[in-house]
Amino acid sequence: MNSAKGENPRSILIVKLSAIGDVVQTFPMVKALKNRYPEARIDWLVEEDASDLLFGHPALNRVIVSRRKSWLKSLFVLGKFRGTLREIRKFIQDLRSEHYDWVIDNHGIFKSGLLLVLSRGRRKIGFQPSAGIAEEGYYLFANERYRALSIERHALDRYLDLDPGLRDLVQLGALVGHADLVPDALAAMARIAEGTAWNEAGLTADPIQVVLDIRSYYEELAVELADGPPGPWAAERWFFDETEAGKTVLEARRAMKAAEAPFPLWFYMAPATRS
């Protein structure tokens, strides 16, 4: 579905609350939106645990932080009830201070749906009901719902599917839809695995984004080649267990860890269960 409809939004709010890995996977969509609509104001609504990743992001105008977990704890602490209510009221005021052209909820659960309601937006865009992607009735809060790609497709693909034009505008890793760039990215990963510093290996973006693009290319290929719909996480397992590309990524990840590269950059290159 093309949610853009030829429109040039002046302001966009992204609702992606957590977790850190899911927030990182949303970066290419934000970059693509900024490339496509360079004059648009782009804000992001996030929970506090993942908020540090967003401050200073060049594509964002504002980061709105929900301290939901802290508030829930403080509401039941003697002497903190009124102060917590004031914080919540201030948060809602900040959230509603801008009337957005688009509010895009990629999170897909009830708590994000409630924030979708609280936000002020002309078009509130979300997924249609889909197991593992859009659940808990959150889609009832959106006034536009688009059909999500299969859960077997990479989350990056689902987010970019908001508008087919976004796919060709991702310039962080720049690999999605551009198979000829994959070998260079894998060669950079191989250099990292052999001991080259990650920031000197020739990557076109940070390692997480490049790996997301490589995986997206391979996993989309796996879905196309499968004889019928793959089982849950089958494409991911195939990538890391059966392909040389997946093994190279894991070797690069281990090398970055050993070299004491920043924790998020190597940790989120692969699922936490991968060593």
Image (cartoon, grey):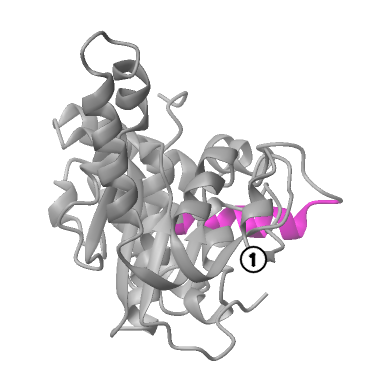
Is residue 154 shown above or below 111? below
Task: Classify mark 1: residues with Cα within 10 Å, few (<14), some (14-19) or many (20+).
Answer: few
Taking the magenta stretch, the answer to whether it contains residue 273 is no
The outermost residue toward the right is: 228
The x, y position of residue 271, in whole percent, is: 46, 32
- Is 76 located above or below residue 182 in the figure? above
Q: In which image quadrant can residue 35 be found?
A: bottom left
Q: Residue furthest top?
A: 78
Say above or below: 254 vs 178. above
Q: Quadrant of the N terminus?
A: bottom right
Kind of residue sitting beneath label 1: Asn
Q: Quadrant of the C terminus?
A: top left
Position of residue 51 measured from the top left corner of the image (x, y, whole percent): 26, 42
Magenta part, dominant SS: helix
At mark 1, the secondary structure is: loop
Residue found at the very far front of the displayed protein: 82
Q: Position of residue 230 (x, y in %)?
A: 77, 44
Residue 202: % across, % down: 21, 62
Instruction: Name the one closer to the observer, 209 or 5.
Output: 5
Which residue is under mark 1?
143
Residue 218 sits inside the magenta stretch: yes
* Residue 167 shown left or right of residue 172 in the figure: right
Left or right position of 238 against 247: right
Return the residue nearer the eye: 85 or 55.
Answer: 85
What segment is highlighted magenta in the picture? 213-227
